[in-house]
Image (tube, rainbow, N blue to C red):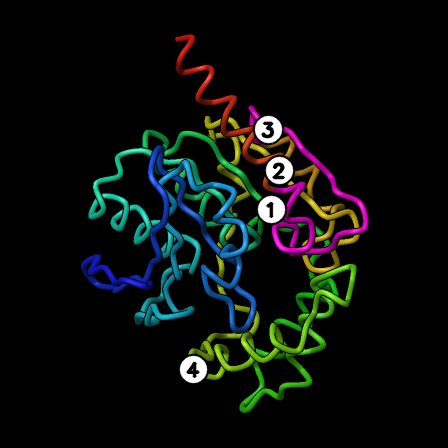
Amino acid sequence: MTSTLDVGDARLAYTEAGSGSAVVWLHGSGPGATGMSNFGGNLPAFADYRNVVVDLPGWGESPRPETGEPLIFHAADRVCRAMTALGIDRAHLVGNSYGGAVAMRIAMRYPDRVDRLVLMAPGGVLPADAPPWPVGLERLFGYMAAEKPSREAMAEFVRLMVFDESLATEALIDERYESSLRAHPELPIPPNFGDLTPDLGRISAPTLLVWGREDQTVPLTWAPKILAGIPDAELRVLPHCRHWVQYERAPEFNHIVREFLRGGAAAAAEG
């Protein structure tokens, strides 16, 4: 069940499940994205954690506020306010794509709020030669720019997110399409997400990068810059997988992430 929080100048929708150490889940910026559409299938594997799945500002049930601030920076501050309102002093952050960038920004600006970071093909760090954009980002921006985007455009976008296109079910396409029409973002194309590159070295949290080898949205060739920039980062690459790692390879993703988070718990116990 979705609840809402007032965080000052914004209202954030979120879903909470489980109990234990807190994990905050941050979704991507694709059309029709919501916290639960990105991570709902993963939550049962994390029932021994307190899971807070956020709809970031302007997506899902969270209204888009008026702001000239880069979207990553704006969202990171509001997520931290939401954590405070929910009584969460410190949490693991799990974010994919745009949500991974929001997680990195929180770790840079509020390091005492973050235990461990899990980032699936995160945004916010571009190579020197971008644009031209990868085909996945071209489709994303094209959908956002359309005055009345079509269901077929959504189907093309969803199919590009997975290596195994049988996972791009008609039900999933319908869900994402209807969600995108309810909250079609009115953004410049491309949006001003913000650049995290200069501050990668400020991330002190142990960080796990998870990437699909065949990602056509945030390609694997973008990973080394982040891997080299974050002092305590490791990279796992899953073959036969594109951008939606947590969806397309859910069992492996759940296992990898649980092992990584458990490592943090073991270190705390030994300390």
Residue 125 vertical position relative to residue 170 in the rendered view, above or below: above
Q: Earlier in the sequence, mark 1 or mark 4?
A: 1
Q: Is residue 40 shown left or right of residue 254?
A: left
Label pair 4/3, CB-CB below 8 angstroms: no
| Residue to which mark 2 is pinned | 209
Indicate which disc residue 182 carries.
4
Give 219 or 189, whichever is nearer the viewer.
219
Using the numbered discs, state the Cα–Cα distance from disc 1 to disc 2 in whole angstroms.
Answer: 6 Å
Residue under label 3: 233
What is the distance, in whole Å, between disc 3 and disc 2 at their CAs? 7 Å
Question: Which circle's residue, 1 or 2, is located before the other in the chain?
Answer: 1
Q: Secondary structure at mark 3?
A: strand
> Mark 1 near mark 4, Cβ–Cβ under 8 Å?
no
* Sequence order check, earlier mark of 4 and 3: 4
| Residue type at the position of mark 4 | Arg
Residue 120 is labelled as: 1
Residue at (67%, 41%) from the top-left corner?
Answer: 252
Earlier along the polypeptide chain: callout 3 or callout 2? Answer: 2
Q: Earlier in the sequence, mark 3 or mark 1?
A: 1
- Between marks 4 and 3 in the image, the one whose residue lies nearer the viewer: 4
- Circles 3 and 2: CB distance less than 8 Å? yes
Which amino acid type is shown beneath numbered disc 1?
Met
